Amino acid sequence: MVQGSISAAQLERLIRSLDTSCILSPEEWLAKLDAGRLAASDRCLTFDDALLSQVDIALPVLDAYRLKAFWFVYSSVFEGAIARFEVYRMFRCRFFPDIDMFYALFFERVTAAFAIDARAAVPDGDVDRVRNAYPFYSANDVRFRVLRDRLLTNGQYDAVLDGLIADRGLTLAELAAGLWMSADHLRSLSAAGHIVGLHSYSHPMRLGDLPDDEQRSEYEANFRHLTQICGRPPITVAHPANSYSDRTIEILTDLGVRCGFRANMAPRLPGHPLNASALELAREDHANLMRRLEAQRDTG
Ligand SMILES: [Zn+2]
């Protein structure tokens, strides 16, 4: 199973652990949000990135419980692009008996190629700090993410991963086949009372750092695509990789977006309020919920 993904049985356990009467449909959620009447106990369900596994595995569980959700979709993969981050995630989780075997090989390749001692490049104190904020990460998960997101350039990271994939005799296109939903999936979700929302066009990892015009074209292209597929303009967003700026919020507001989700339970800046605006609602990762649920089972 891909790291960060859960099985149908786990999703069902998660849903049963919540009071299902607190899980609002997207329509109810938006109505209460607009009226300023969302209660602390109100919940909604969200799925990001248009993965085919979400309709194959999660949707039947939602249907069984008569639940509707928000689905946040980036458009490039519907128009022939391959999103490397998703292919790489699948490769490292499915093609190694355990994720630490992938990390060992990755650290070895980085050290050999770029004169970085990959295992020592991230100080233990930094690792601990990240793990306090994201307790579901292992120390190696953190080292890997810091190397990928900060210490290596995109080109260096892609070169290492493409090399590992080629060593297996595989191609990106082969790995990408069957990863994402089709336009028909989006249409039927939308027709069935789910809400399909914005998630940018190409899922940049630091959208909030992009120049204004690039941010705007990311969201305008995403907006056009979803409007065309679903037959109505999107009014919700989840910020890809939790990245946005004040400017992003203005662009989304111009597009008529009324509700937006962050990717964690922290405010944008330390000391700022949680849920600072309707476009910055805090969101809990299912990995944290699952972890708490497993801990309860172990002790109870
Ligand atoms: Zn995403």
Image (cartoon, rainbow, N blue to C red):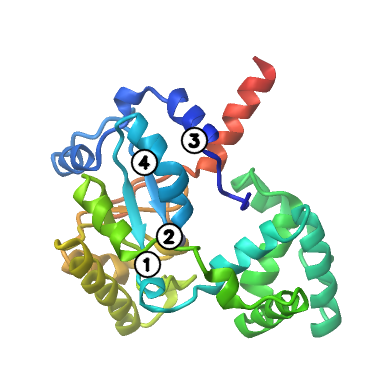
Please identify the residue farthest to the top as the structure is shown. 300
How far apart are the two marked residues, 2 and 1, measured between alpha carbons?
6 Å
Q: Badge 4 is on which residue? A: 45
Q: Which mark is residue 118?
A: none
Under tag 4, what secondary structure?
loop
Ligand 1: does it lie within 8 Å of the C-beta at label 2? yes
Q: Badge 1 is on which residue? A: 74
Mark 4, residues whose alpha carbon is within 10 Å: few (<14), some, or many (≥20)? some
Ligand 1: does it lie within 8 Å of the C-beta at label 1? yes
Q: Badge 3 is on which residue? A: 11
Q: Position of residue 227 (x, y in %)?
A: 19, 67
Q: Badge 2 is on which residue? A: 49
Circles 2 and 3 in contact, beta carbons < 8 Å = no
How far apart are the two marked residues, 2 and 4, measured between alpha carbons?
14 Å
- Looking at marks 3 and 1 on the same chain, the residue that comes earlier in the sequence is marked by 3
**Amino acid beneath label 3:** Leu
The quarter of the image that holds ligand 1 is: bottom left
How far apart are the two marked residues, 4 and 3, measured between alpha carbons?
11 Å
Of residues 241 and 99, which is closer to you in this image?
99
Task: Find residue 151 and report its image quarter.
Answer: bottom right
- Looking at marks 4 and 3 on the same chain, the residue that comes earlier in the sequence is marked by 3
Callout in the foreground (4, 3): 3
Position of the C terminus, as image quadrant, is: top right
Please report the residue visible at 61 percent of the width from the left and 22 percent of the height from the top.
296
How far apart are the two marked residues, 2 and 3, measured between alpha carbons?
17 Å
**Amino acid beneath label 1:** Tyr
Circles 2 and 1 in contact, beta carbons < 8 Å = yes
Of residues 25 and 296, which is closer to you in this image?
25
Task: Find residue 175 and report its image quarter.
Answer: bottom right
